[in-house]
Amino acid sequence: MSAAIRRTAAEKLASLRSLMAGRFAAYVVPSGDAHSSEYVSAADKRREYISGFTGSAGTAVITAEEGAPARVNRAAASSLHAALLQDA
């Protein structure tokens, strides 16, 4: 992957929030794929792509001001929340 394509999670979140402005109050990013597969392919790891969080389960909820974990255990929630707020 070229350096021009690689961006940090903070840059991706800023771009997403820019697209959300005036259109959506929140954007939900699940960890699963469209088929609820047990093993998710690299192409379907949307939550990991947008947040940098590599945990096996959880859902990210991104708003204009912040991101928050949903439906994960306490340790994963803390890690995901940190990933969403890092460099924000």
Image (cartoon, rainbow, N blue to C red):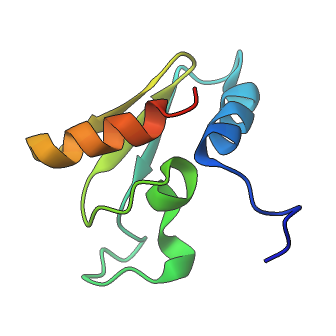
On screen, residue 41 above or below 13? below
**Near-viewer residue (66 or 87):** 87
Give the residue at x 37% y 62%. 54
Give the residue at x 85% y 73%. 2
Position of residue 43 measured from the top left corner of the image (x, y, whole percent): 57, 78
Q: Is residue 72 visible in the rendered structure shown here? A: no
Position of residue 4 measured from the top left corner of the image (x, y, whole percent): 89, 61
Q: Is residue 82 left or right of residue 13?
A: left
Position of residue 6 measured from the top left corner of the image (x, y, whole percent): 76, 61
- Which of the 4 quarters of the picture holds residue 3? bottom right
**Near-viewer residue (2 or 22):** 2
Q: Is residue 83 left or right of residue 79?
A: right
Position of residue 11 measured from the top left corner of the image (x, y, whole percent): 70, 40
Q: Is residue 13 visible in the rendered structure shown here? A: yes
Give the residue at x 38% y 79%. 40
On screen, residue 64 above or below 16? above
Task: Give the position of the N terminus as an image quadrant.
Answer: bottom right
